[in-house]
Amino acid sequence: MAAGYAELLGTRHAARLLAGTLVGRLPNATAPIAIMLFVRAEGGSYTLGGALAAVYGVANAVGQPLLGRAVDLRGQPRVQFPAAFVSALGVLLLCLSGIDHPVLAYAAVVVAGLFTPPLEGGLRALWPSVLGDGDKVHRAYAMDAVAQEIMFTVGPLLVTLLVSLWSPAAALLVINGIGVLGALSVVVSEPSRTWRSAPREAHWLGALRSPGLLALLGSFFFVGVALGSITVAGVAYGDDHGKPWVYGVLMAALGLGALVGGLVYGARQWAGAPEPRLRVIVALLAAGYLPLMLTPGIVAMSVLAGVAGVFLAPALACAFIVVDRHAPRGTVTEAFSWLVTTFGVGSAVGTGAAGPAVELGGTAASFAVAAVGGVLALLVLLATRRVLTVPPADGPVAEGGVNITGAFENDRIGPVEPGFSTGHQA
């Protein structure tokens, strides 16, 4: 497994781009818990904290595809870094205004969320020009999913550490400052500066004109609901036990489970189309959320959280391939940004719903929101299996853009996922 990572990361620019993207995405990855802890420290309710985090998520969901389309049209440096800087200014406004003036607080999180740079979609757009062939690009998508779980494991722990050392406001400011530096590291790199999207057909719907992509986005909206609700449910569970640090442990366990699942998924070869496999993985993901409603003791709950996370990274890795197979040509950054958007909207809905669920039905009710989200994600995939069976024969799928010094690469992802073999890490 390690040899597979080393092969990819040994490619020029690959390690820097992956690290810069992960660091640049820390503000987005930790925003729900950081906002919730900030509101609670200011004396606000779960409902207010959940609402602010939800507004951030909705604003982020709106901004990602818009900024992604701007990246496809204008290039990465002109969009990514300015957006990261403005987003950080929104967080600074929140910290300065506090929650005494709700309108100002909501405006601040809207700015922070709306201008979150689409670094995740941007990285996946860069992989073909950096790595070259389709085999390595496929493995990079899977490695990306695993690396995200490291970020989602470390991120909550970093937030809780900064809160314990200083304050929730300091945690927000430090993490967003780090995020700006991560975005800067990406956009000054040669691949980012020279990358250009492939020619695209003019269409106001952009990537959304693909029925298969719409089906995938519908399913992952509900995966986002599940993950967003767990954010609030984990805080409530920690409060129930009088130990706020328990939240960080649960989120770390969830991320660790996803990391292990991603490693196992990438260690074997997967033949055949990814769409049927995605249905199985999402079914297992949904099953993992159900036991969380039992809310047992801390040790047992940590184990359940780890199990619940096992199929998350495989689901993401498989979804990245499905996006490649179904998105129209020339919409590479926008298409991946829409996947981020579905997570953002779903997470916002889950976060917003879990707050009142805690206050009305207790912690178990908030974990029930996650279980319902997982089940609905599976039902969407089952209901849309016809449009997700194969990519349209007459519609080229998204490709990895073009370097201005070279030719188009990775024009089409075939029906088989090569490269997921033992020794090639996911």
Image (cartoon, rainbow, N blue to C red):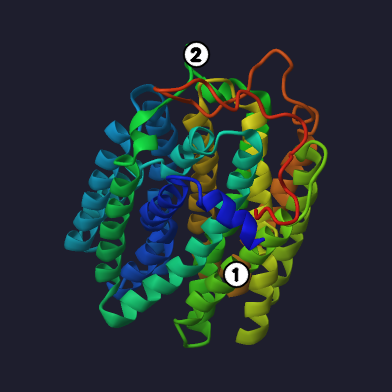
Residue 20: x and y, percent?
A: 38, 52
Q: Quadrant of the N terminus?
A: bottom right
Amino acid at circle 2: His
The disc label shown at residue 203, or none: 2
Q: In the figure, 218 relative to 257: above or below?
A: above
Residue occupying image coordinates x 60% and y 39%: 137
Residue 222: x and y, percent?
A: 62, 48
N-terminal of the pair, mark 2 or mark 1, is 2
Q: Is residue 81 visible?
A: yes
Residue 15: x and y, percent?
A: 45, 52
Amino acid at circle 1: Leu
* Nearest to the observer: residue 104 or residue 174: 174
Q: Quadrant of residue 368?
A: bottom right
Q: CA distance from mark 2 to mark 1?
A: 41 Å
Give the residue at the far left of this rendering. 96
Q: Is residue 278 left or right of residue 64?
A: right
The local secondary structure at tag 2 comes to loop
Q: In the figure, 391 relative to 224: above or below?
A: above
Disc 1 target residue? 256
Q: In the figure, 337 relative to 199: above or below?
A: below
Q: Quadrant of residue 276?
A: top right
Q: Quadrant of residue 383?
A: top right
Label 1, residues with CA under 10 Å away: few <14, some 14-19, many ≥20: many
